Image (spheres, helix red, strand yellow):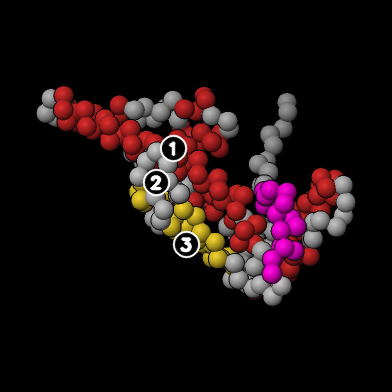
Amino acid sequence: MIPSMLKRKENLILLADAYKYSHHKLYYPGTTKIYSYLESRGGKFEETVFFGLQYFIKEYLEGQVITKEGIDEAEALMHQVFGRNDVFDRSIFDYILNAHGGKLPVRIKAVPEGTAVPVHNLLMTIENTDPRCFWLSNFLESLLMQVWYPMTVATLSREIKKVINKYYNATASIGAEAGIDFVLNDFGFRGVSSVESGGIGGLAHLINFNGSDTIQASVFAKKILWC
């Protein structure tokens, strides 16, 4: 019998684009604060539903996420990736480990999950709380930008529900609107790229509808609400 494997926590230091590892060297000398924000610059719809941030915070950013083992792993891999040893600077991660116990010195603010926000408006901000970690705000961008996936699902699902409501009101019998929450049923789990995509995308759909065959959506709801 093959023994079951424990879930391996992702190494946060490796969850970034390659250029991020030398990005801190490019800031103006004396920089101590980076305040970044997320917005929808516009598109097919006039509003964007903000959703998914809580999952990414709890799954990847909460608690001690920088460890010596993680730094060692990242240092070895980055030397292989770049073919040189002067790109990855472990000292900036060692500092977070030693000064903050591996917890991230950042502050993230956002509109409430599930809020429909007109495009060209602020959705989320992130800033460093330790002057020596000014680089961290934008280092986390690669991971936090993944919030666009559940936001896209939630936004599209909401717009489809508007269309459904419109034609129910125009054509359906009185009382039939009780079925609206179940007419767009989610069978998306079989078509997504991963279990995580199925969970977070399926949960984004449940903001607008109650019908779903994606069980992972309920699993992720518990992760976000009760973990």
Q: Residue at x 61, y 61 (%)?
A: 137
Q: Which-is-in-front pick, marks 2 and 1?
A: 2
Helix, strand, or loop for circle 2?
A: strand
Between 191 and 31, the one lying in front of the other is: 31
For residue 218, above or below residue 41: above
The residue at the point 39 percent across, 46 percent down is 48
Q: Nearer the viewer, residue 99 or 154?
A: 154
184 left or right, relative to 124: left
Residue 80 percent across, percent down from the top left: 85, 45
Residue 169 x, y percent position in the rendering: 17, 31
Against 165, is 39 above or below? Answer: below
For the residue pair 28 and 34, the one nearer the viewer reads as 28
What amino acid is at disc 1? Answer: Val
Task: State the residue position of label 3.
Answer: 109
How many numbered markers are drawn? 3
Residue 48 image label: 2
Which callout, 2 or 3, points to the residue nearer the camera? 2
The circle drawn on residue 153 is 1
Q: Residues within 10 Å of mark 3 (few under 14, many from 20)?
A: few
Distance CA(mark 2)–CA(mark 1): 10 Å
Sequence-first disc among 2 and 3:
2
Could you tell me which secondary element the residue under label 3 belongs to? strand
Residue type indicated by callout 3: Lys
Magenta-tinted stretch: 11-28
At 58% from the left and 32% from the top, the residue drawn is: 194
Q: Is residue 47 above or below residue 156?
A: below
Residue displayed at 62% across by 58% down: 138
Q: Say which quadrant the N terminus sits in.
A: top right
